[in-house]
Image (tube, rainbow, N blue to C red):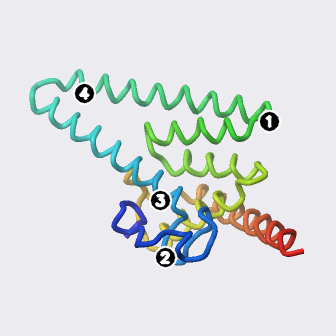
């Protein structure tokens, strides 16, 4: 399983397991990431069903237009995310990248959202969960919601940022313990 869908989330959740809600679980991503992945998969599946139905009904042009509109909206959100990042608004950038991911899921957009979260005070654990997910997915030869395996460039970034996020989480834990 690629940690997508409620069946893979297991019972009880993070709080019942005695760990923070956004901390990665040994058997899957943190609940917030699992929810995001699940929603992206559901949206993508629904869009593909709609396109298949429109194409079967002879509306291939409408289906193509709808796909193009989604891609354009995702690209606009992606551009807004980059602008927010350049102005130091990392939470807003993370939200924009997440919204773009929901419209057109890709590993690059998922990693971009994690990178923005890593830049925020409380986002290191959520970012760590995303990097862990992408690396585990690659180790298993799995594909993301977009049906693609992560690229070498995406994997290199995930490895580098995983180490950075791990160090940040360790620092936060040490500060909390003192």
- According to the picture, the residue beneath numbered tag 3 turns out to be 34
Mark 4 secondary-structure assignment: helix
Rendering coords of residue 37 (x, y %)? 45, 54
Q: Are marks 1 and 3 in contact (CB under 8 Å)?
A: no
Left or right, residue 147 beside residue 164: left
State which tag comes first along the sequence, 2 or 4: 2
Q: Nearer the viewer, residue 92 or 60?
A: 92
State which tag comes first along the sequence, 2 or 1: 2
Q: Quadrant of the N terminus?
A: bottom left
- Mark 2 vs mark 4: in front: 2
Mark 1 secondary-structure assignment: loop
State which tag comes first along the sequence, 4 or 1: 4
Rendering coords of residue 85 (x, y %)? 73, 36
Residue displayed at 65% across by 63% down: 128
* Residue that extends furthest to the left in the rendered view of this protein: 57
State which tag comes first along the sequence, 3 or 2: 2
Mark 2 secondary-structure assignment: loop
Q: Nearer the viewer, residue 43 or 79?
A: 43
Numbered mark located on residue 63 in the image:
4
Residue displayed at 49% across by 42% down: 101
| Category of crowding for the residue at label 4, using alpha-carbon neighbours closer than 10 angstroms: few (below 14), some (14–19), many (at least 20) | some
Mark 3 secondary-structure assignment: helix
How many angstroms separate mark 1 from mark 3 (CA)? 27 Å
Rendering coords of residue 49 (x, y %)? 21, 40
Quadrant of the rendered image containing residue 129: bottom right
- According to the picture, the residue beneath numbered tag 1 turns out to be 88
């Amino acid at each position: 399983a690629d940690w997508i869908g409620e069946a893979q989330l297991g019972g009880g959740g993070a709080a019942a397991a005695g760990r923070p809600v956004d901390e990665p679980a040994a058997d899957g991503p943190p609940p917030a990431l699992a929810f995001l992945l699940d929603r992206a998969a559901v949206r993508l599946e629904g869009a593909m069903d709609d396109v298949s139905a429109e194409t079967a009904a002879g509306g291939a042009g409408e289906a193509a237009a709808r796909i193009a509109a989604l891609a354009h909206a995702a690209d606009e959100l992606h551009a807004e995310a980059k602008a927010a990042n350049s102005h130091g608004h990392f939470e807003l950038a993370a939200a924009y990248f997440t919204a773009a991911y929901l419209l057109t899921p890709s590993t690059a957009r998922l990693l971009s959202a994690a990178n923005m979260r890593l830049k925020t005070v409380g986002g290191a654990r959520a970012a760590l969960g995303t990097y862990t997910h992408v690396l585990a997915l690659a180790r298993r030869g799995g594909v993301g919601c977009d049906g693609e395996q992560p690229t070498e460039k995406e994997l290199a970034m995930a490895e580098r940022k995983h180490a950075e996020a791990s160090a940040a989480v360790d620092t936060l834990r040490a500060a909390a313990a003192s």
